[in-house]
Image: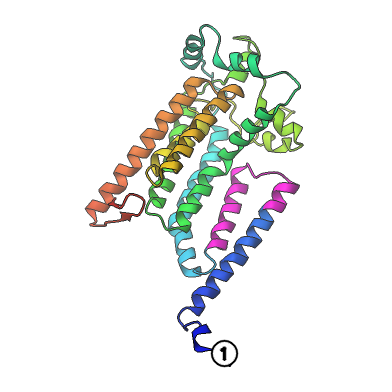
């Protein structure tokens, strides 16, 4: 006969069953994601990223279907539409207009003492046709751009962090700030100015690594095809500011204070991304700095807006990371 102390209270049983369901659904999602990545490659096109994001939300919210559906409709769907639209318009924003090289080229030339930092770094570290371990490291850091920002939003959502909504809305704001600049002021990256003879030619390191690992189809999503027809996601002169550098800095500014070691990781990640972009020939140092500035503006704007809205409506939210009302 089963002892009473071994029996779970009736109110606990549904909760335990729900946790088990989450474990199973999360395992299924993870197995599917690993299988997809091994067979096709990590998802880099936004539509694929969003699909896996939605599947992750469903898997993690399996225990709470009504709440999950509600948050998908009111929290996630407006941002998904905004980011999806951003990607399509990003590819259309070039419009054949003249792309600029100032002030980014002049700034980098001054910073490098007459030679831009990209050329100096590749002269010191890169050999054509050779892919070294740090090239793979840079490729890995670069690739996190396609997954990290939204994956971090899923983590905040899963733990019901009060920082979730400001972070997610600020992510969309930052993307559209970048899009507006691309439209108003198209700018050339170092790999393009090198091909035009403004300095020594540089290699697109990330694209070389994609090809060496046999998944160059991921790189082609963001560049014109060999026949010259542009991908709808591609804008070769969407370089100023660098959103690759902006997103890690934005994450650091929005999530600082949760844990000191986490803040340190965000700082290291932001700096590593900036160095990778310059070394890989994708951005000038000026583009990286401007991306950081855009991140600061977006973080300030969205935090100010949410604080104003909460005060106006008498809503108080306690941030467990800082033990303060935000």
Q: Residue at x 38, y 50 (%)?
A: 163
Near mark 1 (Cα within 10 A), the count class, few <14, some 14-19 or many ≥20, is: few
Residue 282 in the image: x percent, y percent?
59, 25
Q: Residue at x 71, y 31 (%)?
A: 209
Relative to 186, is 230 on the left or the right?
right
Q: Main secondary structure of the magenta part?
A: helix
Q: Is residue 208 magenta?
A: no
Relative to 81, is 164 on the left or the right?
left
Q: Residue at x 65, y 19 (%)?
A: 125
Q: Residue at x 55, y 27 (%)?
A: 94
Which residue was labeled with disc 1?
2
Q: Nearer the viewer, residue 52 or 124?
A: 124
Up-down relation of residue 201 to residue 245 (above or below):
above
Secondary element type, mark 1: loop
Residue 213 in view (yes/no): yes
Residue 110 in the image: x percent, y percent?
48, 9
Residue at the top extreme?
114
Relative to 126, is 276 on the left or the right?
left
Q: Please provide the residue range marked out in magenta.
A: 34-60
Up-down relation of residue 111 to residue 284 (above or below):
above
Q: Quadrant of residue 90?
A: top right
Q: Nearer the viewer, residue 309 or 206?
A: 206
């Amino acid at each position: 006969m089963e002892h009473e102390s071994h029996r779970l209270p009736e109110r606990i049983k549904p909760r335990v069953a729900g946790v088990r369901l989450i474990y199973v659904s999360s395992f299924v999602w993870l197995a599917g994601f690993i299988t997809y990545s091994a067979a096709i490659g990590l998802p880099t096109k936004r539509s694929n990223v969003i699909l896996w994001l939605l599947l992750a939300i469903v898997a993690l919210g399996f225990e709470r279907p009504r709440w999950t559906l509600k948050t998908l409709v009111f929290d996630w769907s407006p941002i998904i539409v905004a980011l999806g639209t951003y990607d399509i318009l990003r590819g259309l924003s070039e419009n054949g207009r003249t792309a600029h090289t100032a002030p980014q080229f002049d700034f980098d030339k001054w910073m490098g003492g007459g030679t831009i930092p990209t050329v100096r770094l590749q002269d010191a570290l890169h050999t054509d046709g050779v892919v070294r371990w740090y090239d793979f490291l840079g490729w890995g850091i670069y690739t996190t751009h396609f997954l990290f920002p939204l994956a971090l939003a899923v983590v905040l959502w899963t733990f019901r962090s009060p920082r979730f909504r400001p972070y997610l809305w600020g992510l969309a704001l930052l993307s559209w700030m970048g899009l507006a600049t691309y439209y108003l002021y198209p700018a050339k990256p170092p790999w393009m100015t090198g091909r035009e003879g403004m300095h020594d030619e540089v290699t697109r390191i990330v694209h070389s690594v994609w090809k060496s690992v046999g998944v160059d189809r991921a790189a082609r999503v963001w560049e014109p095809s060999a026949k010259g027809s542009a991908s709808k996601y591609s804008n070769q002169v969407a370089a100023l500011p660098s959103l690759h550098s902006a997103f890690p800095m934005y994450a650091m500014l929005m999530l600082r204070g949760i844990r000191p070691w986490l803040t340190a990781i965000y700082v290291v990640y932001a700096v590593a991304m900036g160095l990778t972009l310059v070394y890989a020939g994708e951005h000038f140092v000026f583009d990286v700095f401007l991306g950081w500035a855009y991140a600061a503006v977006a973080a300030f704007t969205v935090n100010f807006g949410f604080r104003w809205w909460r005060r106006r409506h008498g809503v108080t939210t306690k941030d467990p990371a800082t033990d303060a009302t935000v």
